[in-house]
Image (cartoon, helix red, strand yellow):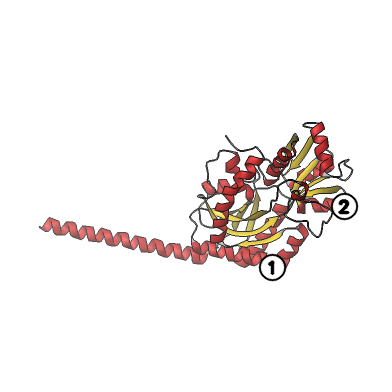
Amino acid sequence: MRSFRLGARLHVHLLLAALALFCISLASASWAADAYPSKPIRLLVGFGAGGPTDLTFRKLAELAGKELGQTIIVENKPGAGATLAPSNMARVDKPDGYTIAAATAGLLRFPHVQKVDWSPTRDFTWIAGLGGYTFVLAVKSSSPFHTVEDLVKYAKANPGKVSIGTAGAGTTMHLLSEAFGAMAGADITHIGFKSSSEAATNLIGGHTVAALDAVGSMLPFVESGDVRLLMSFDAQKADWMPNVPTAKSLGYDLVYPAPYGVVGPKGMSPEVVAKLNAAFKAAIDSSEYAKLLTSLRQTYWYKGPADYDAWAREFYVSERSLVERAKLGRS
């Protein structure tokens, strides 16, 4: 009987100790969330320096960092269709809010193109949707191709001779170039570079016939007279480029806005996510960021954590159709 009572007491003590540890862990997690951020934050960007994505997230890091009272350090880690940075983060970084990553449409597309060991719908915390790109097809100003029809006609007569440069394999630009070639019935060669600036430099240098990129990366060269725009992938003609037809108006069913935002590893605390979301929301609502959006011809596109996560799940499913049209789906 005595041994039974001793066992019961021991059991109670163990339960009380476990409860105490649980309460301490909760208090510790709460304190960490309250104190966040107490050190600099890393923001991984899957594109090279100098392009519109890099410029965009550097400005976002600067403005959101001011809101948080901490420095947000941008690290460029291009590769794997701009998914190398966020996928590595998801695998190795703690969900403590001190490492986050830029998310572009490629994060929701790449698993349809190539087998990966991560899932965009299971392995990330979707923090905030922030903006969107407009994509364009461009040629050198001295190019003999003045219309898309000119380009396609030549490509059909000279298989493999028309090259389109983009900011990398597996990116939205790559998929659009392949889908365009497939829908045009033309053998077009894709050349992926490490950044938008590299793609533009090679176009101007005559190393590629055309380039497909965010309009913001092409605007300086359009304004300098080095580049001409042949086509956009927006739903409608833009007021600021009235002479540039849309792909849809030319018979190509390629209307493609490309939202971007920030993500973290799965399992982030709601309190930390809320702080990051509020900081980035303040950043995109600022007049300083509005000027950048205008200069890069990007669009304002805000979604909070729950809406951003829901959008990502829907977009992930819809991306399969673009991959199939580009004939790049994995077998």
Q: Mark 1 Cα within 10 Å, few/some/many (few <14, many 20+)?
A: few
Question: Mark 2 belongs to which amino acid?
Answer: Ser
Q: Mark 2 Cα within 10 Å, few/some/many (few <14, many 20+)?
A: few
Residue 90 visible in the displayed image: yes
Residue at image x 51%, y 54%? 95
Q: Quadrant of the C terminus?
A: top right
Looking at the rendering, which quadrant does residue 195 occupy? top right
x and y, in percent, of residue 126 in the image: 55, 56
Q: Give the camera-side residue of 233 and 15.
A: 233
Instruction: Say if 185 sits above or below 269 in the image.
Output: above
Residue at image x 43%, y 63%? 28
Q: Which residue is mark 2?
A: 224
Q: Is residue 308 left or right of residue 202?
A: left
Instruction: Say if 38 sits above or below 264 in the image.
Output: below
Q: CA distance from mark 1 to mark 2?
A: 29 Å
Residue at image x 78%, y 47%? 250
Q: Which residue is mark 1?
A: 286
